[in-house]
Amino acid sequence: MIRIESVTKRYPDGTVAVDRLSLEIPDRSITVLVGPSGCGKTTTLRMINRMVEPSEGTILLDGEDIQRRPVTTLRRSMGYVIQNAGLFQHRTIIDNIATVPRLLGWGKRKARARAAELMERVGLDTALAQRYPYQLSGGQQQRVGVARALAADPPVLLMDEPFSAVDPVVRKGLQDELLRIQDELGKTIVFVTHDIDEAIKLGTMVAVMREGGHLAQYAPPAELLSSPADAFVEDFLGADRGIRRLSFFPSAGLPLTSGPVIPADATAERIAAADAPWLLVTDAEGKPLGWGERGDLTAGDIRPDRLVPHGRPFVPGTDSLRAALDCAVLSPAGWAVAVDDAGRVTGVVAQATIGEAIRSAHAAGHADVAEVAS
Ligand SMILES: Nc1ncnc2c1ncn2[C@@H]1O[C@H](COP(=O)(O)OP(=O)(O)O)[C@@H](O)[C@H]1O
Ligand SMILES: [Mg+2]
């Protein structure tokens, strides 16, 4: 565990970048430092690997003051990833990733084999191995940066706004990849960002910092959203805090109904028997085609291209109440479409029912919606 104990950093010009910061960073999880520009995030991160020395206070790694560890040994145990990846421009991708193992004295063949393995791990095609950084997209370069930081298998990974310079779609891919890698490797990751959504998505614990290097709140993301410590945190979390909080409520227990679900080849009797104004039409495999008003649907002549789009369905058990609510809000019928992993419809659920589940989830605090919605 990394423990930051009442650490202050005063730069020579008098700037107090970090002010009596105390944090316990748990092992094998992602801890995010988030806050506006200039609030001391980078300074904090760099004090952990001693690129910056604290003016006061102590940082402990597994109970030992990091001041007592030789800087080289300390840094070897901590991979470091920065914005724009910071790759060596004159080295190939494979040699960039193999840098630290080579420094540690590994043979060329072994280091390159390890680098190739890491390329796959971070989702890079090994065909890119002999390219140079400028021949890669920004997102690919960031993946190389992550692979390079992981090369010597350090227990700790320090990441300073690693995904801030790429576009939102690529960024989402990198975030998902990091979560997947973390599931496999279980590193102790300290991740800096100014993006609160990124913090909430990635962090097991989130430290919200404010100007002057003050810690405003340190809590799991769901707790930040439900109980911001003060007006600064609330403001920083931004609008639709309530909606975003629904990401932490499971959709597993929502009661589904298949009453309004009909196959495209439904008989007239079946259509007549479906007791709802809007019907969800499915294809031969049971996948959703779209919504149709019951009065407009004629047996034997249901035209998929005339149906109203069903929006993005949700997968109960995998997706959150937020996904279910979004689906219901987008649907003209006000019903969300639930599908299994193969995309086949398992039922639909009304907006009002989702609303009840949300109220129950609130009432039950963190209790599982699966219990309270049924
Ligand atoms: N080397 C330095 N000398 C003087 N002031 C610095 C130095 N590095 C950072 N600062 C100042 O310290 C504060 C915190 O900076 P930094 O840790 O980089 O914040 P963040 O990463 O949250 O944007 C800022 O006011 C910044 O201008
Ligand atoms: Mg910074």
Image (cartoon, rainbow, N blue to C red):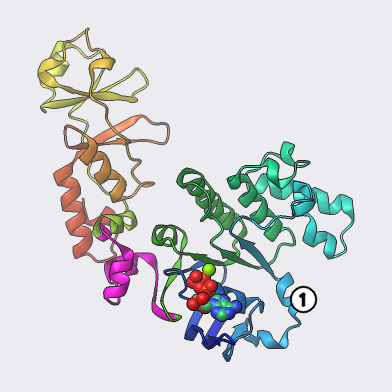
Question: What range of the chain is rendered magenta?
Answer: 214-241
The residue under the point 29% across, 72% down is: 228
Q: Position of residue 224 (x, y in %)?
A: 33, 69
Residue type indicated by callout 1:
Thr
> In the picture provided, is 282 more to the left or to the right than 118?
left
Whether residue 218 appears in magenta in the rendering, the answer is yes
Residue lying furthest front in this view?
13
Q: Position of residue 365 (x, y in %)?
A: 25, 66
Please say whether residue 2 is visible from this viewpoint: no
Tag 1: Cα neighbours inside 10 Å, few (<14), some, or many (≥20)?
A: few
> In the picture provided, is 241 more to the left or to the right than 91?
left
Q: Classify mark 1 as within 8 Å of ligand 1 or not, answering yes or no.
A: no
- Position of residue 32 relative to residue 130, above or below, is below
Disc 1 secondary structure class: helix
- Position of residue 208 relative to residue 62, above or below, is above
> In the picture provided, is 113 more to the left or to the right than 303?
right
Residue indicated by mark 1: 72
Q: Residue 58 sits in which quadrant?
A: bottom right
Q: Position of residue 124 (x, y in %)?
A: 66, 43
